[in-house]
Image (cartoon, grey):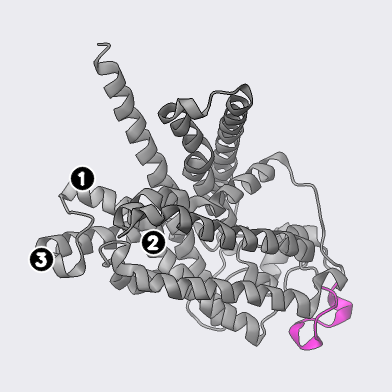
Amino acid sequence: SDVLRPDLMRRVGSEMAVALQFLAYFFDSTAQILYCAEYLDQLLPGSDVCQRQWLLIVWLVAIPLMQAPNFGESRASVVVALLCLLLNVGTMLGEVVSYTPWACEPGPVYESPPASRVFVGFTAFAYAFGGHGMYPEEVREMKTPSEWPRVMHWTYGICCSMYVLCGYLGYYAYGTAARANLNANFPPNSLNTVSILVQLVVTYYCIYVTSLVMLLHVEEHAFGIDPRTSCGQTTARAAGVRFVFRTAFVGLQVLLCWLLVSFPGDLLLSLQSLSGAVGMTALTYILPFCIHWILAPEKVQTRRMKAWYIINIIVGLVIMIGGTIAGLQDMLEVFFGDRDEDELSCHLEFMYAPQSPCDACYVSGLPEHFYELPRELRNETCPAYFDADLRLRRR
């Protein structure tokens, strides 16, 4: 039994890590699908196509891209996604500098969030570093794996700079009214339209890339398909299995979105935080410290180093548990909360600034042609956003 115990622990630990990774990227990819549907709804606000119909369209459009066998076969699209990402950061800077929301009326509000929202925020932050679970697969497909440290330096240098800039500036500009879909905080101008189009390209690619690690794992272990097989080496059986399995997999995610959309609230933030809590907190803040301590104990010998590792593991566990509870509460409220069928919305509740009473520029501060109501009727307050009667009046 002493001989079997380490093997059993390794097997259990491996399966738990796979399960966490699976759940994390399942919810992540689901969020990307929902992003696509929201962007399409924003681009065509007067369309008779509702969010639920957009979800079906996104599913059909995603099917061809999902057939790319692995990361190596989709590497060209990464360049496009990176350029789009940089362009969107520039768009945000342009929108904020052009309209200075902090000078608007009523201006941004900086309220202290309840404990549950604090956990949602922490896990959403973990979500921002959620790519860690893809690193082993990416290293395996690299021609020169020894170049990985250089890749990390460039990745963290670019991403962390963007996170700090967008996080601090976005909160200063929009306060607690900042949406997970930040384009909803911008007015419906040409720059925002271009940004949404670009975001659509990025999220379309993310539907594929965030699901790929899970898909490759299942295809390898359940169907015997080599994850390193390129398009030119794919057999008819592998192509057929990949098509059916991946189409059904994305269809399951679309079904989850179908059940959740059309109800009030920032569902995107809830999905992202749940993804961050269930798996990405473990993959980013817990498991790396545990694994390094186990595999290289000689590098974790001082009391200060051990204390640092223990603090990170404990904080990660607290955020993981609290974030999972908070995220599940949000989802359960959507499924089982008190609501009327008339509350279902075909389109996004508030597509652009300054439509929501919570917008920093709801009363004034933007050019008048962006306002649907005359100034004397812009007297609703932000708490009224949660009033059912107000939502029904806006239908």
**What residue did someone put label 1 on?**
221
The residue lying at 16 percent from left, 70 percent from top is: 232
The picture places residue 244, in percent across and down from the top left corner, at 21, 61
User: Quadrant location of the C terminus?
Assistant: bottom right
Q: Amino acid at mark 2?
A: Val
Under circle 3, the secondary element is: helix
**What residue did someone put label 2 on?**
209
The circle drawn on residue 236 is: 3
Q: Is residue 354 left or right of residue 36?
A: right
Does the magenta segment cover residue 374?
Answer: yes
Q: Main secondary structure of the magenta part?
A: loop
The residue lying at 52 percent from left, 83 percent from top is: 47
Which sits earlier in the primary sequence, circle 1 or circle 2? 2
Quote the CA–CA distance across marks 3 and 2.
23 Å
Quote the CA–CA distance across marks 1 and 3.
18 Å
Q: Give the crowd class for mark 1: few <14, some 14-19, many >=20 residues within 10 Å.
A: few
Magenta region: 362-379
Does the magenta segment cover residue 316?
Answer: no
The picture places residue 360, in percent across and down from the top left corner, at 80, 68
Quote the CA–CA distance across marks 1 and 2.
19 Å
- Write down the quadrant of residue 183 in the picture: bottom right
Q: Is residue 252 left or right of residue 44?
A: left
